[in-house]
Amino acid sequence: MIKITLPDQSVREYAAGITGEEIARDISPRLAKEVLAITVNDQLYDLQRPINEDANIKLHKWEDAEGKHAFWHSSAHLLAEALEALYPGMKFGIGPAIENGFYYDVDPGEEVLTDADLPLIEKKMQELARQKMEYQRRDVSKQEALNFFEKKGDPYKVELISELEDGTITFYEQGNFTDLCRGPHLPNTAPIKAIKLLSIAGAYWRGDEKRKQLTRVYGISFPKQKLLEEHLQKLEEAAKRDHRKLGKELELFAFSKRVGQGLPLWLPKGAKLRERLENFLKRVQVKYGYEQVITPHIGQKELYETSGHYAKYGADSFQPIHTPAEGEEFLLKPMNCPHHCEIYNVKPHSYRDLPVRYAEFGTVYRYEQSGELHGLTRVRGFTQDDAHIFCRPDQLKDEFKKVIDIIFYIFKALDFKDYIAQISLRDASNKEKYIGSDENWEKAEQAIIEACDEKGLETVVETGEAAFYGPKLDFMVRDAIGRKWQLGTIQVDYNLPERFELEYIGQDNQKHRPIMIHRAPFGSMERFVAVLIEHTAGKFPLWLTPEQAVILPISEKYNEYAKNVLNFLNNSDIRAVLDDRNEKIGKKIRDNELKRIPYLLIVGEKEADNNQVSVRRQGEGDQGVQTLEEFTAFIKKEEQKLLEEIETSPSRSQGGE
């Protein structure tokens, strides 16, 4: 007999070999119908997989991420079976579940798959799903696995198998399809009721531009048609909010083939938006004792070898820049932290000087493959709202908590109410990925856990997601339509201070090593602006928007008065623009509504005679007539009210999970 501990800590005894499906049925027949997968001692299992030892378990339904993972992973195999049935001889790469759905990378040979083929493939998947085929797991030897896929002529699977250890290899079979896979999967295909194949893209095998480009088929599936319809509505809304589309319409940023892929150009309105975000954070940082610094866009290769970044990421960086001097090599700056370490080292420090807080909006450059570039969210040149705090051990937790306060302040200001705080730890079983001693890692991880506890912050823990030099706290924000984005990050680092030999003189008159906190509340200006555009659908808060009002003369006769209004507002620190095109007023209103400008000020004969403007609010229509002084006071009062609400918000957000 074995002991099975449920999430409520109750214990049940079963014969060894019991399955998750049988446990669910024993608890409740209804639960058995809804459960999709099971976690056994922190490992996700199929429901049919035998449990042979004492275990802590958790049963997963569709509402759980683990349940969705098994559902979508099974759907990826169903997609592969449909493709093989429709296109015999197709070769297969990998087919994982992803955050929303699944994909499969395939080599169609002479065939060319297009979006026009997706309905046919969908139909075949639905036909196969209705057959209620079981997903069967089978342990195989390495040689058996190699023989199977060599005979089948699937070189991508052969390559993957060649890198695996004998005794760790499993096949999954359903219907006429067999795949190399760890699992887990659903018991059978019956729960897969609604399927939508979304798109086709190119993807280099194993992410290597020098390897063959495969065809990636994306899809999503649900246990109910209604859930699929709701998801498709969200996708439609997401398309309307796409920052690439809105960025072009609102004239915020652009890309140029001549400048280069992944290198955004900030247009005047986008530059104003970005400048306001930067100034907002700078004001906050002044209150928290930060000092601004500026560092070069390049650095000697030796700098990044010292930090450890070159060994970890050198292959993925831009190639070194060679100068006329023999042996002299520079790199485009891939991160700011080594530069800030060198600034700290410029002069000696006493324990009384600490903490030292250096902040910089520093532009960095990282080589991303062309297929991975995506608007502002994945670029090759981006600006981090970076800062590094050098502190004593007794200051570490307080400094960490102050950074949490800054992040919550930003979330409040920009109406991000829903977030997940994730503590990212190292994978202790894979230490070659990281630098530094076990002792330092343990101290750094413990400091983050304790700081979060003291802030009353609910967190999730992800092992293996730490930076190579230290653990971190990441904030995953859900936007207005429920999508998850990683924004703010705070990292504790004992390692770079050692590598750069940073020191301070303690109370004992001896040399000590400071601890370094890396933090970026926005993450990067590019990614943050992209998320903000999509979160707000381009309707920015009044205090942030590049243009607060647009003046619309009803005919050319009133252009001169409109210019006087523009000058008055601009001189009163109201960000206003003039639309004096020779167009009908109705068209001007429609065009400027699309630009998401909060206030439209219409001027004609009556307004010109009385030094007034007729006010329209974006999305709300006519707001009546006001004098210029009244409108100016109204805007300033509204803006001040918004900023006061931010200022008086609690330091701990109420929206977290």
Image (cartoon, rainbow, N blue to C red):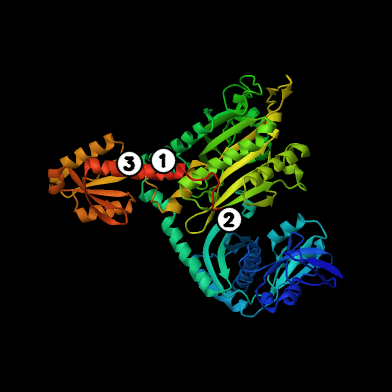
Choose the circle earlier in sequence order: 3 or 2: 2
Toward the viewer: 252 or 175? Answer: 252
Q: Which quadrant of the view contains residue 640?
A: top left
Choose the circle earlier in sequence order: 3 or 1: 1
* Residue under the point 71% across and 45% down: 426
Query: Which residue is identified by label 2?
Result: 203
Query: Which residue is identified by label 1?
Result: 266
Label 2, secondary structure: give it.
strand
Cα separation, mark 1 vs mark 2, equals: 29 Å
Position in image of residue 630 (x %, y %):
24, 43
Kindly tell me whether residue 261 is visible in this rendering.
Answer: no
* Residue under the point 76% across and 46% down: 428
Furthest residue in direction right, as rendered: 1
Toward the viewer: 467 or 171? Answer: 467
Label 3, secondary structure: give it.
helix
Which one is in front in this view, the residue at disc 1 or the one at disc 2? 1
- Badge 1 amino acid: Trp
Query: Which residue is identified by label 3?
Result: 636
Q: Alpha-carbon neighbours of circle 3 within 10 Å: few (<14), some, or many (≥20)?
A: some
Q: Is residue 642 left or right of residue 505?
A: left
Q: Quadrant of the C terminus?
A: bottom right
Choose the circle earlier in sequence order: 1 or 2: 2
Q: Is residue 91 left or right of residue 535?
A: right
Q: Alpha-carbon neighbours of circle 2 within 10 Å: few (<14), some, or many (≥20)?
A: many
Kindly tell me whether residue 120 is visible in this rendering.
Answer: yes
Please give the label number shown on residue 308: none
Cα separation, mark 3 vs mark 1, equals: 27 Å
Q: Is residue 316 left or right of residue 538?
A: right
* Residue under the point 61% across and 72% down: 82
Position in image of residue 474 (x %, y %):
60, 46
- Badge 2 amino acid: Ala
